Amino acid sequence: GTSAAGGGGDAAYPTENITFVVPFSAGGPTDTVTRMIAEPMAAKLGGRIVVQNVEGAGGTVGAGEVARAEPDGYTVLMHHIGMSTAPALYQNLDYKPLEDFEMVGLVTEVPMTVVARKDFQPATLQDLVAHVKANADKVTLANAGIGAASHLCGLLFQSAAGVKLQEVPYEGTGPALTDLVGGQVDFMCDQTTNTSGQISAGEVKAYAVTTPERVKSLPDVPTTTEGGLPQLQVSVWHGLYVPKGTPQDVVTKLSEALKVALADQQVIDQMAKLGTAPVAADDATPQAHRAKLEEQLGTWAKILADAGVKAS
Ligand code: MLT
């Protein structure tokens, strides 16, 4: 972007297009949430937001690119819980979550669903656990790469079920869901922001939601606790990041625009239809986001270590 005279801040920001990097394929849950808030944020900022998908390695390729981008407010990263699991999963991660980014604010926390191709034989979550244990060498589990939310949920499922399955990685759960609907892969754990439509259309079989309570927009899908797998609980929190060193007044403008987007009735309604909701205004702030990331980094490092997961 144009460097403001005297540096330190950019009163005219934005003076050119802002790129929102989504570290997963177009059409997936991260892309969906990003495109929902991009328009009302752009309106508030008085500029244009262009969404760019930078796939690979469970979201770590896109995150790394933003960590090394110009800290001028023109490159923003939308990322999720994977920001807090990657350090425990990758030996040579090329960014440090807490040091290489400024946090802008939290966006939403999305429930996950355990879904399978519609003609998959198991009828309930209990049947699924029994089936995968008896057929561990044949059953295929889709995810969006090591560090993706679907990968994390798949790890927790396998750990809870006491089984090791063949994992099929995709560049995002958008394409993974396409293959699931096509019957090319057996099952996966993915966010309601991606699976709700196909569940309601009967194109995939939904065994459970991974939240303590049922999801209002998916009233017939039991919780994992109801299905006998109470330890399989995970929700995918999302936040916006800019490179470390981005001027504070730019970070503040982005956080204010995020709050406006999260209060936008269309955003609220779209999120509700897809099983989620915006975070409270106080959480769409750098302070709340940093606190969440710090807590989650510690939480997942311990859970993954306890599950015997080693960084590779
Ligand atoms: C996506 O947007 O494709 C998902 O977030 C991938 C994942 O994290 O499972």
Image (spheres, rainbow, N blue to C red):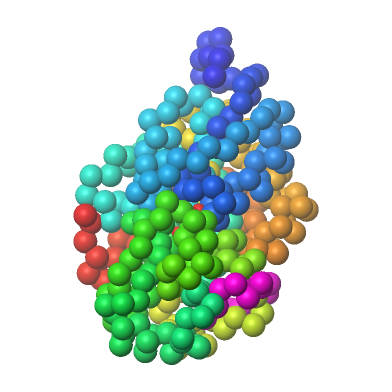
Q: Residue 204 magenta-drawn?
A: yes
Q: Residue furthest right?
A: 265
The C terminus: image quadrant? bottom left
Answer above or below: position of 90 versus 184: above
Q: Which residues are magenta?
A: 199-217
Image location (x, y in percent) of residue 32: 60, 51
Residue in the image at 72% along x and 28% along y: 46
Work out whether 39 lies above or below 14: below
User: Depth check: 308 or 288 in front?
Assistant: 308
| Residue 10 occupies quadrant | top right
Would residue 299 be found to the left or right of residue 292 on screen? Answer: left
In-front residue for pair 161/172: 172
**The furthest residue to the top:** 5
- Residue 175 in view of the camera: yes
Give the image location of residue 277, x and y in percent: 65, 61
The quadrant of the rendering that contains the N terminus is: top right
